[in-house]
Amino acid sequence: MSEMIHNQLQAARMAAGLSEYEVAECVGLSPAKYQDFEDGKATPPSQILIKLGQALNVRVAYFFGQL
């Protein structure tokens, strides 16, 4: 599941035209922590997934492969 989340996270960020730094700043994370999520080294908790969905203009379900 974590692999899907990080792939979808990266795809949503790129589609939004944002840098990793910009997304991290938007949701209140350090750039290093955000990069861990995108690289699949860590899985974001549900509260962070909600914030990421809002920042990237996608539903949380998108991160799990549901359009």
Image: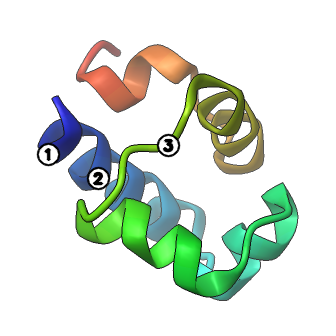
Residue at mark 3 to residue at mark 1: CA–CA distance? 12 Å
Q: Are marks 3 and 1 in contact (CB under 8 Å)?
A: no
On the image, the x and y values in percent for residue 51 come to 75, 38
In the picture, measured across the screen, residue 15 lies left or right of residue 28, that is left
- Give the label, 3 or 1, closer to the camera: 3
Q: Residue at x 35, y 56 (%)?
A: 42
Q: Of helix, strand and loop, which one carries label 1?
A: helix
Give the spatial CA distance, label 2 vs label 1. Answer: 5 Å
Hey, what amino acid is under mark 1? Glu
Per the rendering, the mark at residue 6 is 2
Q: Earlier in the sequence, mark 3 or mark 2?
A: 2
- What residue lies at 59% left-to-right and 34% top-to-bottom? 49
Residue type highlighted by circle 2? His
Measuring from the top left, give residue 1's x and y in whole percent.
16, 28
Residue denoted by label 1: 3
Marks 2 and 1: CB-CB under 8 Å?
yes
Compared with residue 2, is residue 27 higher up or lower down, i.e. above or below? Answer: below
Task: Please state, as top left, top right, bottom left or bottom right, where the C terminus lies in the image.
Answer: top left
Look at mark 3 in the image and give the residue it sits on.
44
Residue 23: which quarter of the image?
Answer: bottom right
Q: Give SS at disc 2.
A: helix
- Say whether residue 32 is left or right of residue 66: right
